[in-house]
Image: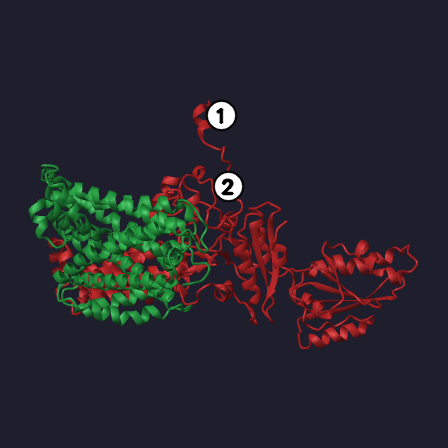
Amino acid sequence: MGDYQKLFEPKKNKGNKINITKNLQENLKKVKEILSDCDDMVYREFNVGVNQNLKFATVYTEGLADKIIVNEYVLKNLMMLSRMTEPEVRNVREKVYDLIKDGVLSVTDLEEVDDLNKVVDSILTGETVLFIDKWDKAIIIASKGWPMRGISEPESDVVIRGSREGFTETLRVSTVLIRRRIRDPKLKVKQMKIGKRSKTDIAVLFIDGLVNQDILKTVVYRLRKIEIDGIMESGYVEQLIEDNWRSPFPHIQSTERPEKVAAGLYEGKVAIVIDNTPFVLIVPTTFNTLLQASEDYNERFIVASALRILRYIAVMISILLPALYIAMLSYHPGMIPTELALYIAGNRDGVPFPAAIEAFIMEGILELLREAGIRLPGPIGSTIGIVGGLVLGQAAVEAGIVSSLMVIVVAITAIATYSIPDYSFGISFRLLRFTFMAAAAFLGLYGVMIVFLITLTHLSNLKSFGIPYLAPLNYNMSIKDLKDTFIRAPLHRMKRRPEFIAKNDKNRMADSFSRDYLKKGEDNSG
Amino acid sequence: MDRNNDMIVSNQLFSILVITVIGIGVLSLPRILATEAGPDSLILLLLSSIIFLIIALVTQRLIMKFPKQNIIEITNSVLFKPIGILVGLVYFIYIFILITLEVRAFGEITKNFLLLNTPIEVIIIIFLITTIYLVRSGIESIARMAVIILPLSIIPAIFISLVAIPDLDFTCFLPILRTPFADLIRALPKLFFSFIGFELILIWTFFVKDTENIKKTVISAVGFISLVYFIFTGITIARFGIAENKDLIWPVITLFRDVDIPGTLVENVEVVIMATWLLSIFMTIAISYFGAVFLLSRILKSKEHNYIPVILLPIIYVLSLVPDNIAEVYDYLDKFSIYVGTVFVIAIPVMLLFISFFTKKTKGGIRKNG
């Protein structure tokens, strides 16, 4: 079986253990001490048995535990049912736990613990704890149930054709959404807690036998090294485990779409699901994956390939267009065809700034608009768009502060940036654009090429969990390696998983599968 | 740079070799060919390609005898200990001088075509600093860069030169084979300038993971380089004729300046080509730079050699400004390639292979017949 099991062996418990005593009152006192001033705790003591001589107590957090479970299946059963029938066992006191576990509590998930620290942890995660007098253990009853958001369509990764389900803030719902797409016992869900105070649940998902063991090892190692008080969002984890914190490029993918995660797992990647956030992390991530939309796989390959190429062009436009505008106008006017040059000269007539300043002003305003629009609620956001984009642009051109060509350049750049599927990836290009513009302002096309080379060098240096960020583009380009990059080959031609990730089980499809049977007329379509 | 995971695959070696060789050689190649062989230019090119392939295979044979070793270790294995250091030092100086000349040539061309009013010092300094970033990143990053930049710099150039096809006049290659054969042979060393950079394979093979594929890589790299040279010289000479090609410093650049693609957004295509050419010359220099740094660090036996490229930078900068003008740079380059390049590209590998047949010891290396 998998070697992965060693990785997840729990750390040696360093925390001091507090034993549960046989005295119910003492136990409760201790719990109340630990949870002092936590007014959201509910303590309930009650008597059980025909003679009402067994003392019980339950503790849970109000709102985190499902009250119906506690009332109907724990309290009701213990208090009513156990009174109706006399247990056959003589020595009730000694056998009380077995009796309750096997006969009374109609809840599926029970656990027996002897450490008060664990008890407190469970209470805080939403479980209900049952103490029994004269017995030095406690029963933890799974009763998690808090108000949660339903599954809804993801806001950030929108597709036209594809599943409408998105992850929610609850870890279990998220893993279920992935499990529903991979009904394979080999899909492993290993959970751990990170955060000294937040004790956030984190699940590492992978398909055993398919996953790249080196990557899995690195992921688990880095996750376990994290020592922080609280994890608010997957962004925390991302920044703490990523390879290069100085890089502007995201090298861990975060997504709200379950099928993206499932597809990643099928490629041999590792997914990290974090409680309290709908964003799931996928590692390793390459430059190429961030330009893939999940819809690419749902459309026919010609359409998908065309869209892929379009996206690569969009990336080039979004980082280069304003820089090229500056470089060509200020340093290489000879490059512009004569008629166009005359038009631009006429258009820029009266504009008081050089092209570089003009570009910086307009791009700066655009970034401002975007930032303003994002934080505002929907209808006002679009107002900002109209006021900023239409009114301001028009007024600026009419006032002669910027040329209308500049407005066009800025608009094209903005559109190109928005066509990059991954949001954080898009931001890094927006940032990069200003570097390119500055270089173009100082050194023209030479500067642009120099920054391009620096960026490319940085990208070549970058690795995501041991996988080169530029993979598979960094090996010699043969058609075989490019099946899922600039183009998307037909599904039946992509019989192998990406070679740079999946090392173990390389075949996605049976080799024997071909679409020839359609030609031979072996099917029944006549 | 010396970590265990510094490994490249033979596919990446192909890109490294091709981009190092093509970078600076292609621009002036048609001039050399037209001057030396006139109408028989392509024949001379074919001849030199074949001879170079043989030399490359000799070098490869030497490498296969001592897999996973660099030139210093190979020499030490073939001869005896201090000789390796000496050969390494000589190679280092050779590469170093080559870099300074290339940097200067690059600066001149960039100034001429992209930044007329910027001082060449600024161009060179900025360029060298960018190069250092890549050099310090190590062989893996260099290999990845080479693979990506190779198509980026060659494909646009080929596409644009295809536009010139309607204007071509292939009769300038006639009459065929009228040049005395002795003249062709005599011209061969001059052509090795266009293949300079290939000898660095003696350093790269140290990093190659799949040694068994090196032979295939060498053959396909030489083949690819020759093919690219054929396309560009063929088109350039057929476009301008023999006489004009003799007078142009960079005939290939003139070709792009001359090309007029109807109905495009860009009028002067040569600027675009210069920009993409900048990519490949950057790689050529960065790769040679890394080779020099690697050799020096081996000679000095220093483990940590991230500081070496920084120390070398001012020396390269000063030396690159020594020639007075671009004509002098090309004069130096020509002489350098004929008299010095030939020694390093041909003489040393052949000699080493020859001697290795007699001295049977292969220290540390596994005997393998390529």
Amino acid at pointer 2: Asn
In depth, the one of A226 and B136 nearer the eye is B136
Label 2: element kind: loop
Residue positioned 61% across, 67% down in the render: A199
Q: Residues within 10 Å of mark 2 (few under 14, many from 20)?
A: some
**Chain ID, mark 2:** A
Q: Are marks 1 and 2 on the same chain?
A: yes
Q: Position of residue A355 (x, y in %)?
A: 19, 65
Q: Position of residue B130 (x, y in %)?
A: 29, 65
Q: Earlier in the sequence, mark 1 or mark 2?
A: 2
What whole-number distance in Å separates the C-alpha atoms at marks 1 and 2?
A: 25 Å
Give the color of chain A as drawn.
red
Q: Which residue is mark 1?
A: A523
Amino acid at pointer 1: Asp
Q: Position of residue B324 (x, y in %)?
A: 13, 67
Residue positioned 38% across, 50% down in the render: B358
**Chain ID, mark 1:** A
- Tell me: residue A118, above or below residue B189: below
Mark carried by residue A507: 2
Residue farthest toward the left in the current orientation of the protein: B243
- Chain letter, green in picture: B
Residue positioned 24% across, 61% down in the render: B98
Label 1: element kind: loop
Q: Position of residue A182 (x, y in %)?
A: 57, 46
In depth, the one of A445 and A278 nearer the eye is A445
Residue positioned 33% across, 57% down in the render: A417
Q: Are marks 1 and 2 in contact (CB under 8 Å)?
A: no
